Image: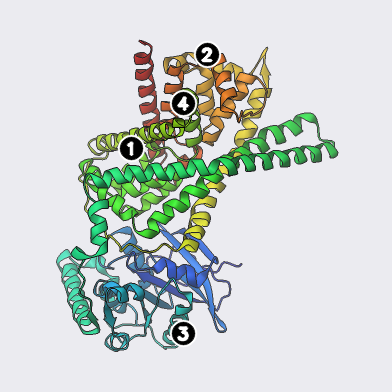
Amino acid sequence: MGLTKGSVAGGALDAGLVIHKKQPQDRVVALAGNPNVGKSTIFNALTGLHQHTGNWPGKTVTNAQGYYSSGQQSYVLVDIPGVYSLLASSAEEEVARDFICSRAADAVIVVCNGACLERSLNLVLQTLEITNRVVVCVNLLDEAQAKGLTLQLPRLAELLGVPVVGTIASQPQSLNELKQAVEQVLAQKTASAESMGRLCGLEHLSTEKIEKLTLEYTRRAEEIAAEVVSGGTEVYGHSRDWRIDRLLCSRLGGYALMILLLAVVFWLTLTGANYPSELLSQGFGWLGERLDDGLVWLQAPPWLRDLLVQGVWRTLSWVVSVMLPPMAIFFPLFTLLEDVGYLPRVAYNLDRPFQACRACGKQALTMAMGFGCNAAGVIGCRIIDSPRERLLAILTNNFVPCNGRFPTLIALISMFFVWQMGLAASWLAALLLVAVILLGIGLTFLVTRILSGTILKGEASSFALELPAYRRPRLLSVIVRSVFDRTLFVLGRAAAVAAPCGLLIWLLANLHWGDASLLAQLAAWLEPLGRWLGMDGVILLAFILGLPANENVVPVMVMWYLQTGSLTELNDLAAMRELFVANGWTWRTAVCTLLFMLLHWPCSTTLLTIKQETGSWRWTALAFALPTFCGAALCFVAARILSLF
C-alpha cells in the first residue's frame, strides 16, 4: 500500500496530516458526529478491517482512516473525533473544525442520533457553514422507533438542502444508500459556502460573538426538529433507562455495584485465563524444544543455544502466555460494558470524588482502562481536555494494577493468605484481591489531591457527560475492537521489550565476576535495601529486572533460588511456596512483596507511552517516582508494624 500525502490548503493541518490513499484518485470522506451516535459502528461497517490509526499533528487525539469502495470509485474514510459543536476550544473540537476547514476532505458525512435529532442538528448546521458537500446520516432509527418517534427525512433533506439518509448502523445493508448519497454530493462542482469564514476564523472572534453564533444554531436546530419530528411521549423520568440509572447511579448502590461488577470481571478474567495460559505455555515450550533442535542441527555453539532458547525465547513465550489470555478476556468484558452504556455511568459515579481531588471525572474511565494495561490507560487520558487534568490522570494511572501484575498478586495471596482453606479459598482470594485494588484506587485519589494542590494546582474543570441509552451489545464488534485495537496493540508493545529483557537476564545469570554470577552479586548489593523494605535483595532485583514486563518478577526469583542460570517457573503453587519459605520468606515478606507489586515503577512500555503522550522526560521521571515512593513507604511501615508480631 502506498502512502500519498493529501493536498491540504489553507488549514492548520498543512504541516503533518498524511492521508493514506491506495490510489491517487481516491476520494477523501470525513465522518463527523456527536459522541454515542454510532459513528464508530458506521466507520467499522464501511471499512471493515482496512484501517490505519495515528495521531492528529500536534494533538494527542487519535485519528482513524479506512477504505471502502462503491462502484468503480474507492474512498478514504477519515474518522473525525466525536464532538457536539465546532465552536468550542477542546482538542477534539479544534481538530474536527480544522480538518473540515482545511478542505482535505472531498465530502463530509455527519452522523445524527435519530432518537435525539435536535441536538445532532447543531453540528450539521455548523458543518454546512463550511462546506455544502455534506451527507446527513440519521442513525439509530431503531431506537427512535422504540421511543415512538416519527421522522420526516425527505422534509429534513429539503430544509437542509443536502441528502439525508436513514440508517441502522448495526445492519450493514442499510448503508448502501449512504454510499450512493456520498457519490451524489461528490458530483457537485463546488464545495464552497458563502459564510465559511465565520467558523474557520474563530480565533479572531470574541467570546460574546461565539456565544451569539451558538445561540443562532441552537434556535435553528429547534425549529427544524419541531417540523420533522413527531410522536414520542415517553420522557426519561419514566423510562426503563431512568429506573436502571436510579440503581446504578445512586450514591450507595452505585458504588457497591461497581465494586461487585469489578470483582466479577476480575474473577472471570483470572479464572478463565488459567487453562489457556497453561496451554500456551506448553505450546511455547514445545516450540522452544524445536528451536533448540534446529540450532543443534545448525551446529550452533551451546552458549548461543542457551541465550536464544533459555533467555530470549523463554522470556518472550512467558510474557505472551501470561499476558494474552487475561487481556483476551478482560478487554472484551471492558468493551462490552462500554458498548452496553455502563462506563459513562462509572464516570458519573466517580465524578464527585475526582472533583473533590480537583481532577476530571473522565479520569475514572482511564483508571479502569489501566486494569487491563497501564499503557492503554495512559493513552486513554487523551479523552481529558484539560492539560493539567490529563497530566494528573497520566501520573496516577500506575496506582491500579495491570493484568501483568495480577498473576503475581494472585499467587502471593494463594500461597500465603488463603493456604489450605479448601473451597473458601477462591472466594477469600477474590475478596483480598478486591481489597488490594481498592487500596490502589484510594491512593489514586490521595496522590491526585496532593498533586492538584502543589505542582499541578488548579480547579477541576466541568465537562458535559452524556449518559447514552442502554443498548444491546454488538458481540462481533466488541470482539474485533477489543482484540485488534487493545489486546494485540498492548501485547505487541510488551513482546517488543520482553526479548531484550530475556537476553539481559540470561547474561546476568551466566556471566561471573569472581566466584559468583553478576546476578548474585547484584542481589547481594541490594540486600540491605531489600531487608529495610521487608523483602530481600533477590526480590528487589527481580522487580528491577521486571521493568520491561512485570510477568518476569516471580520467574527471576525462582531462577535465583534454584540457581538454574535461566528463567524458571514452578507451575505448582505448593512447590513454589516451599521454595520461598526455604529461602527465608515469612508472612511479613509476602505482605511487603504484595504491596510493592501493587505499587512500584511502571513497566518500560508504560514509561515509553508516558514520554510519548507528555513529550517530557521530567513528567516521565515523576510518573516513575510517585508509585515507587508510595510503595517503598508502605513496605517500610508494614515491615516495622509486622515485626512486632
* Alpha-carbon span between mark 4 and mark 3: 66 Å
Q: Is residue 208 left or right of residue 341?
A: left
Residue found at x 65% / y 19%:
563
Q: Tell me the amino acid under the disc marked 3.
A: Gln
- Kindly check if marks 1 and 2 are in contact, taking CB atoms under 8 A apart as contact: no
Q: Position of residue 8 (x, y in %)?
A: 44, 71
Residue found at x 76% / y 33%:
305
Q: Is residue 532 left or right of residue 75?
A: left
Q: Disc 2 marks which residue?
A: 584
Displayed quadrant of residue 450: top left
Q: Disc 1 marks which residue?
A: 441
Q: Position of residue 226 (x, y in %)?
A: 20, 81
Q: Position of residue 142 (x, y in %)?
A: 35, 74
Q: Give the label on residue 421, or none.
A: 4
Residue found at x 34% / y 35%:
438
Element under label 3?
Answer: helix
Foreground tag (3 vs 1): 1
* Alpha-carbon span between mark 4 and mark 1: 28 Å
Element under label 1?
Answer: helix
* Alpha-carbon span between mark 4 and mark 2: 23 Å
Q: Give the label on residue 180, or none.
A: 3
